[in-house]
């Protein structure tokens, strides 16, 4: 039998408010203590009008509804009713308008409507008050987060670590562990900037003011996140924080910053194999990025030739005008072009080849600018501009 079909416990409905403004009928009993004011409770519910018309349901959405009890986040009848429930309990509440929406209509809820809610309480969490309670609260959530990390549920683990970190005022050592764990989770879910922030808050000193250059992009590395002041004191030499921050830098190809943190971490923990392996990976990836950048520029220049901006000459039968003021026969032009290689048409017998070659060589150097000695290597094979 589903929770919505559970048989009612024998007994009349009970009143929880003056004038029976909130009536409760227990459909299934729960167990354990009652939630305290300001506890965060998680429930499923189905809301209907007195005529049975359903207007809302968390079950239909498939997601539990969470709110802070007694914080006026829900209608007054809910704060009163859920405060009377035990974990696992299923109850039906009939709530009059004064404890619901009053004379204000809400979407499909008419004004001055009495509402019926079937509510199941799944859990509640009471915030700690004393130092001992805060420590236990943090340890419990840290343990829950660690179990989720073992399962590979890094996003869910982050939620537990964030709750546990509220104990930072009394338990600094615990918070350091939590921040390092959060940094690991941020790395695993692809959030390197957040990982850097967590590690920096643990205590490693902020980077120098001068921004190094990312060789993969040739752009200055943004140090806005790293330059934030330390949140915690007393942990400036935390090798694990330096290592994980280096991993975050590596993830975004900030190789210089990654190597700097790894060198500092290696000095603090010279026997740590993971630090040295990460350093080798950074060097390897940085070299690969630099080779890729050089290759990209090399490919760009290899496509630029002398004739890129010069239209090819058009050969035709009969006299050919090359633009130099001379008319040359096409066959003699080809013979001269084979000897000269400058691309112009010249009559071989009417022009002294060495003098013409010197003039065209100067013109060629002006266009090329490659720095080669064209007098000695004008016909050299394989020369690329």
Image: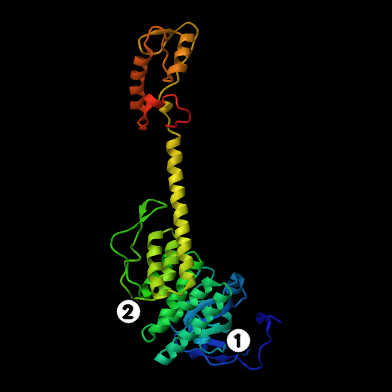
Q: Residues within 10 Å of mark 2 (few under 14, many from 20)?
A: few
Judge whether 198 appears above or below 326 on screen.
below
In the picture of the structure, the residue carrying the numbered disc 1 is 88
Question: Which residue is located at x 40 percent, y 13 percent?
Answer: 322
User: Seen in the image, is 227 located left or right of residue 251?
Assistant: left
Q: Alpha-carbon distance for marks 2 and 1? A: 44 Å
> Measuring 44% from the left and 79% from the top, which residue is drawn there?
177
- 127 to 344, vertically: above or below: below
Disc number placed over residue 233 in the picture, else none = 2
Is the residue marked by circle 1 packed among few (<14), some (14-19), or many (20+) residues within 10 Å?
some
Q: Which of 51/43 is in front? A: 43
Residue at image point 44% right, 38% down = 300
Residue 226: percent from left, percent from top: 35, 66
Q: Give the left or right position of residue 79, taking residue 234 as reference.
A: right
Circle 2: element type: loop
Left or right: residue 320 versus residue 95 is: left
Q: Could you tell me which secondary element the residue under label 1 belongs to?
A: loop
């Amino acid at each position: 039998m589903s929770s919505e079909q559970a048989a009612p416990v024998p007994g009349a409905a009970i009143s929880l408010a003056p004038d029976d403004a909130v009536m409760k009928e227990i459909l299934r009993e729960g167990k354990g203590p009652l939630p305290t004011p300001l506890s965060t409770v998680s429930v499923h519910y189905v809301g209907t009008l007195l005529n049975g018309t359903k207007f809302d349901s968390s079950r239909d959405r498939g997601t539990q509804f969470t709110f802070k009890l007694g914080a006026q986040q829900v209608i007054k009848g809910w704060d009163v009713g859920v405060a009377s429930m035990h974990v696992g309990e299923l109850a039906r509440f009939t709530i009059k308008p004064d404890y619901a929406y009053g004379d204000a209509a809400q979407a499909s809820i008419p004004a001055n409507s009495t509402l019926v809610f079937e509510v199941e309480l799944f859990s509640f969490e009471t915030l700690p008050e004393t130092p001992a309670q805060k420590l236990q609260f943090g340890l419990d959530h840290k343990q829950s987060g660690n179990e989720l990390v073992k399962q590979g549920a890094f996003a869910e683990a982050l939620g537990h670590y964030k709750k546990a970190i509220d104990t930072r005022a009394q338990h600094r050592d615990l918070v350091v562990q939590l921040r390092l764990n959060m940094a690991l989770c941020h790395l695993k879910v692809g959030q390197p900037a957040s990982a850097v922030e967590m590690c920096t808050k643990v205590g490693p000193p902020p980077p120098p003011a001068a921004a190094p250059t990312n060789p993969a992009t040739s752009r200055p590395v943004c140090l806005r996140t790293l330059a934030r002041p330390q949140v915690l004191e007393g942990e400036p030499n935390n090798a694990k924080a330096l290592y994980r921050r280096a991993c975050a830098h590596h993830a975004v190809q900030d190789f210089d910053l990654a190597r700097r943190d790894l060198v500092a971490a290696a000095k603090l923990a010279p026997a740590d194999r993971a630090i040295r392996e990460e350093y080798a990976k950074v060097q390897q990836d940085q070299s690969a990025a630099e080779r890729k950048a050089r290759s990209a520029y090399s490919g760009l220049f290899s496509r630029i030739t002398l004739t890129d901006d010069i239209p090819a000459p058009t050969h035709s039968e009969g006299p050919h005008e090359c633009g130099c003021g001379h008319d040359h026969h096409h066959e003699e032009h080809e013979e001269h072009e084979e000897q000269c290689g400058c691309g112009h048409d010249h009559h071989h017998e009417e022009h002294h080849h060495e003098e013409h070659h010197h003039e065209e060589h100067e013109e060629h150097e002006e266009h090329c600018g490659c720095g080669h000695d064209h007098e000695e290597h004008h016909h050299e094979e394989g020369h690329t501009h």
